[in-house]
Amino acid sequence: DKKTTALAFVILRLFFFQTISLIHYNSLTNDETAHTASGLLYWQTGLFSGGVSNPPLLQLCFALPYALSMADYSLFSNVPPIFGRYVNLLFSFFLLFILASFAYKRWGTQGALFASFLYVTSPSLIAHSTITTTDIGVTLFSLSTFLAMSWWQEQNSPWAIVLPATFMALAMAAKFTSLVFFPLLLFLIVLSHWTKERNLCYLGTEILLLFFITWFIFSASYGFHGVFEGKSVDSGIVR
């Protein structure tokens, strides 16, 4: 109805007014230069060493506008990475959308509006949405992993594991702390097999898909550098 549409519009306007204003107002933070410069280094050289000790997915995303425009951004820059901040804002908008969609499914329109209002009035979420750090991106992929796991539990096909495994691998490619999701998802697969009395072929298919998708996406985030040569990848030296 019109009232719901108006409230949704007000919430979105509040979100974008705060974030876009802060993107241009916030001073430079130390992590921003490291993440953006590392991502640009990866794009320019194809080598994943010498940057921040972190998986490269989000850094590549932050630096993509600079790589496409052939602009330079060094580790010692004193200018905020505005383009990278807008990339992070996009991640934050997707996070808001997924949260609102989940709340709508569980609690209806009022639940979605309330969840969205809490999101856009959270100082922490708004602040992290306006600087190029990995927190919003890894939160997006982590929440997507948990929601996909909930959906997967309701399915009766081993191929359903592809969705939560994909989001889990993206979270792992965003931040090392997300590695905890792998044993968790593996445990849930085995637990589901035991409680639902599924055959070994079903279990084996899910486990193989989990390992393959994780390997493929995580390796792809490094451009498969050194994967087929049996070489290790130095993830960085600067923290």
Image (cartoon, helix red, strand yellow):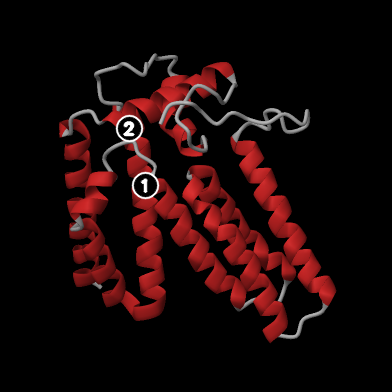
Label 1, on which residue? 135
- Binning the other alpha carbons within 10 Å of mark 1 as few (below 14), some (14 to 19) or many (20 upward) gives some
Label 2: state its secondary structure: helix
Question: Residue shown at 56%/72% (left/top)?
Answer: 151
Seen in the picture, residue 79 relative to 140 is either above or below; the reply is: above
Distance between mark 2 and mark 1 Cα atoms: 11 Å
Question: Residue shown at 71%/54% (left/top)?
Answer: 211
| Most distant residue in the right direction | 201
Query: Which quadrant of the rendered structure holds the N terminus?
Result: bottom left
Three-letter residue code for mark 2: Asp
- The percent position of residue 207, horizontal first and vertical second, equals 74, 63
Q: Nearer the viewer, residue 163 or 198?
A: 198
- Looking at the image, residue 76 sits to the left or right of residue 235; the answer is left
Pointer 2 or 1: first along the chain: 2
Question: Residue shown at 36%/19% (left/top)?
Answer: 75
Seen in the picture, residue 166 relative to 56 is either above or below; the reply is: below
Question: Is any part of residue 68 visible from this angle?
Answer: no
Label 1: state its secondary structure: helix
- The percent position of residue 201, horizontal first and vertical second, equals 84, 72
Label 2, on which residue? 31
Question: Residue shown at 55%/31% (left/top)?
Answer: 235
Q: Nearer the viewer, residue 223 or 11?
A: 223
Query: Which quadrant of the rendered structure holds the C terminus?
Result: top left
Give the image quarter of residue 97.
bottom left
Three-letter residue code for mark 1: Asp
- The percent position of residue 155, horizontal first and vertical second, equals 65, 76
Question: Is any part of residue 227 visible from this angle?
Answer: yes
Residue 53 tag number: none
- State the count of labels: 2
